Image (tube, grey):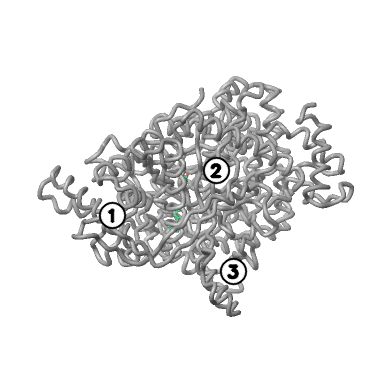
Amino acid sequence: MDRNSPSSLINAVDTHLLETVGVAPAQATPTELMQAVAQVAREQLSRRWVATQRREQDEKARRVYYLSMEFLIGRTLGNALAALGLADGAAQAVTQHAQKLEDVAEREPDAALGNGGLGRLAACFLDSMATLGLPSFGYGIRYEYGMFAQSIQQGCQVEYPDPWLADGTPWEFPRAGITYPVRFGGWVEHQGHQGGKALWRHAGEVAAKAYDMVVPGHGTSKVSTLRLWKAVAPAHIDLHAFNTGDYARAASVKNEYENISWVLYPNDSTPAGRELRLRQEYFFVAASVQDILARHLDEYGTLANLADKVAMHLNDTHPAIAVAELMRVLCDEQDMAWEQAWSITQRVFSYTNHTLMPEALETWPVSLMQHVLPRHLEIIFRINQAFLDFAAAQRPGELGFLSRLSLVDESGERRVRMAHLSIVGSHKVNGVSALHSELLVKTIFADFAALWPERFTNMTNGVTPRRWLAQANPGLAGLLDRTLGAKWRLDLDQLQALRELRGNEGFRAEFMAVKRANKARLAEHIARSTGIAVDPASLFDVQVKRIHEYKRQLLNVLHLVARYQAILAHPNAGWVPRTAIFAGKAASSYAAAKSIIRLIHDVGSVINRDARVAGLLKVVFVPNYGVSVAEVIMPGADLSEQISTAGTEASGTGNMKLALNGALTIGTDDGANIEIRQQVGDDNIFIFGLKTPEVQALRASGYQPMRWYEGNPQLKHVLDAIAGGTFSPEEPGRYRGLVDSLLWGGDHYLLLADFASYAETQLRVDALFRQSGEWASRAIANVAGMGAFSSDRTIREYAQQIWGMTPAP
Ligand code: 26Q
């Protein structure tokens, strides 16, 4: 009897309702059905996990370990069912209970264990690693609370905790036997002389317990593992307080240990610099390194061949302390000679940088590191000494060169530069788009690139077509299946064949019907979440991403205000009806970002209420942006706003998801937009604004935003309205500061300099949208060009060029 047949699944779901969930099948709620269907999938994932581990052990496979503080996986059910080939059967099974699978799947909370692009990239990479059959583990933290939930009250962001584990999750496999001690603080003793064997007299210890999530591959029975660590107070801790009935004290001691894995830091730019964050970073790194070495010793009985069998990848600098930790374990605990340990370490590690912005680069005060990780600090100093000796030999006497390279920033309070540690400790360093990688070696890492040009490389980001097309956009996926067959899921280059269909009336009509249905679905979501009705016939203009000054949501707002004013001035100019859709979270401490959210709401409430522009312009902000909200927004977009100041957005991945779903991009010459343009062709994308060298030149020449304000009456009118209280009549000065930061504060991201070009380009967007056939053809060309942005391509490149592995063809 086929386990995956509909009748078997119907039985399996009922059995789990009865035996696992604890409910009479006839009375099951959608949430209970979700739990039961998840259990059916879980059983098969478990089998696949066991078989995969067994095979990889037998094959003595080389493995890659992806170390990341963030994995933004979102929901699991739909993806698991698709990977296991259970989607149709499960749909039938829930139909027996008078439910729809989509509604049942919606009961699952998102696993929001990440902030944004970096965390979602890690999740897409796991999907691709599993699909390509790469022996692989993701390692991270099992945060009790993920990314905060966002609600909007009177136009302002309000944050709520995200207790995603409150009702348990069907997807984790607690590994009761897998637990490691992680130590902190104390001091270091050296046997005999300084430089003799080091003994770390730690002050405290916490246990790291392993919880696995199984990541299924598509089109393969292989899986990858996401192993997340939870911090647990060691069992012996303060039993005395407990025994004497001092429960408050016992609880507070326990909390002090366990708070390490409590909550994700909701900051995706300026590093928090807090001790707890450093403890989080070391906690998961120390547990992961122990786990990796234990597995290796179990298989080989020696660490001498570690670099032949193990690749460890640093997702940004957040796990960079792993370089010092591996050195510590090899030298102090395994008695390996420093030189051999260093050679292994450099061959094991590789590092991806995700930002050029200097303020976002992670550094830790030497004093804090001394306090939390005294032995690691010594090791970092020794690495630095050897490195600077080497660098000095290359450029004798160049002290500026050496101080720029140093792992320790000596200007002001001494700080350890985690990016420098990552570069020195790795054999490969990559950026995430062609432009970003080029800028890395020309700007922030130029000195390192002069020493080691061959160490630096590019790996342009990608997204998994399984989640971002097959799952998020079943309408388009169905059309592609009928047109191209189903293989595009595993070979996204097959989308190229759509190019020839651009002019095909029938295909265009089907394609636009799918888009229209997705817009209707998005409109329903908007109505439900904001109470605002929007018209699916209007142009859906979408900017969804973290709120950041460099991403320039404010430039988008300036254009919307200009458009509002222009419609009022010229009501009969044949305006294309538009709905501007924003979504995104602001870091809780980022005042300027929060102010932008409020401005979007204030501008929206004036425009949406003004009968004079009714039917021509609407502005909405979709609350609580995250993976599941993105899965509704991406397929319903006509226009994708990717408008960061050139040279600031490392890559972007939302740009890829939107284009893959048939949105046209309006964007700057930045990040992966440049490569998207190359893939879809200049005619199928709207690029505007200053290019990176022009941005640099304008800043160097002394940018005076006031000149642009004075020189552009339309822009002046917009800024005067915002600053004067047109959108905040009850508090006219509310946006004075925001506008002043542009006019008098230097307009660091050059909004005013790019405004005219942006507004003019938006008129070209309108003109194209009026010609619906032409628009359809270009939207199709976008989908057709997205093959290169599958994360399968990205992971193949990492595997071959960085990790020394050969994925299945
Ligand atoms: C660091 C220290 C302390 C607290 C928080 C952080 C922190 C956390 C998250 C710093 C940065 C991040 C996230 C950065 C991020 O998401 N970067 C984005 O990465 C994407 C994937 O490569 C790119 O596409 C985006 O361009 C980039 O902005």
Identify the amino acid type marked 2.
Answer: Ala
| Numbered disc in front, either 3 or 1 | 1
Q: Earlier in the sequence, mark 1 or mark 2?
A: 2
Q: Nearer the viewer, residue 232 or 421?
A: 232
Q: Is residue 547 visible?
A: yes
Closer to the camera in the image, 510 or 245: 245
The quarter holding residue 144 reads bottom right
- Residue under pointer 2: 123
> Hey, what amino acid is under mark 1?
Ile
Q: Residues within 10 Å of mark 3 (few under 14, many from 20)?
A: many
Which one is in front in this view, the residue at disc 3 or the one at disc 2? 2
Q: Residue at x 40, y 34 (%)?
A: 309
Label 3 or label 2, whichever comes before in sequence order:
2
Q: Residues within 10 Å of mark 2 (few under 14, many from 20)?
A: many
Few, some or many C-alpha atoms within 10 Å of disc 1 (few <14, some 14-19, many ≥20)? many
Tag 2 secondary structure: helix
- Of pointers 3 and 1, the one earlier in the residue sequence: 1
Q: CA distance from mark 3 to mark 2?
A: 40 Å
Q: Residue at x 42, y 47 (%)?
A: 354
Q: Which type of secondary structure does the marked residue at label 3 adopt?
A: loop
Q: Quadrant of residue 8?
A: top right
Q: Residue at x 38, y 50 (%)?
A: 322
Q: Which residue is mark 3?
A: 728
- Marks 1 and 2, Cα distance to the nearest angstrom? 31 Å
Give yes or no for contact between labels 3 and 1 (Cβ–Cβ under 8 Å).
Answer: no
Q: Position of residue 779 (x, y in %)?
A: 60, 32
